Amino acid sequence: MRILDHLEEWLIGLLMGAATILIVIAVLHRFASGWPLGSVQDWLISINMSWAQELCIYMFVWMAKFGAAYGVRTGIHVGVDVLINRLDPKYRRVCIIFSLLCGALFTGIIAILGARFVWENGMHYAVFNVLHIPAEDLYEGPTTPDLEWPTWVVYLAIPLGSSLMCFRFLQVLWSF
């Protein structure tokens, strides 16, 4: 359980660090490609960095989904609690429990719908191929423009992040 307690922190830190390094490299590459240095310029121009922006966008999406789960766990999620704080403690507890249950239900539904979307967007094809199950009639799914990754890999952030967020809602509810 120790690893799960800091899963979001590790993922967010890793993704932020990798995205920052990638952006710095892409910007330096673009800047240095403009220097008229003969063969060095030709070599730099031959390096294709067009995929860097797309990858950073996907990394940001994953950061946002796991960042929301981190916000639920730490209680720093944006919320309007002015009215809740003015309630009698007995009613405040009921409202908070109801809110946590609604959050868990909503994120659980999003996780299930997201998992179904990802499965039908091509993950079923990949899983069947890995398990050597005939998949001739199945839809392989679209790919991303620059990286040419299957889009289900990118969209997997939805069911994974929402599942973790649902788990965090239930964890907070249990400790309440």
Image (cartoon, helix red, strand yellow):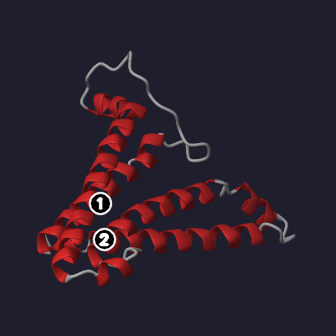
Amino acid type shown at disc 1: Gly
Q: Which residue is mark 2?
A: 72
Whole-number angstrom distance, CA of label 1 to CA of label 2: 10 Å
Which residue in the rendered view is the most extreme toward the top?
Answer: 137
Question: Which of 103/125 is in front?
Answer: 103
Q: Secondary structure at mark 2?
A: helix
**In the image shown, does 78 or 25 lie closer to the viewer?**
78
Left or right: 163 with respect to 76?
left
Looking at the image, residue 1 lies above or below residue 147: below
Which picture quadrant has residue 145? top right
Q: Which residue is mark 1?
A: 103
Residue 10 x/y as whole percent: 33, 73
Question: What crowding class fits label 1: few (fewer than 14 Cα within 10 Å), some (14-19), or many (20 or more)?
Answer: some
Q: Are marks 1 and 2 in contact (CB under 8 Å)?
A: yes
Percent across and percent down for residue 175 are 13, 74
In the rendering, which numbered label is found on residue 1?
none
Q: Position of residue 118 (x, y in %)?
A: 38, 39
- 13 on left or right of 38: left
Query: Percent from the top left, x then y, of residue 87?
Result: 26, 80
Q: Earlier in the sequence, mark 1 or mark 2?
A: 2
**Looking at the image, which residue is at 34% across and 41% down?**
113
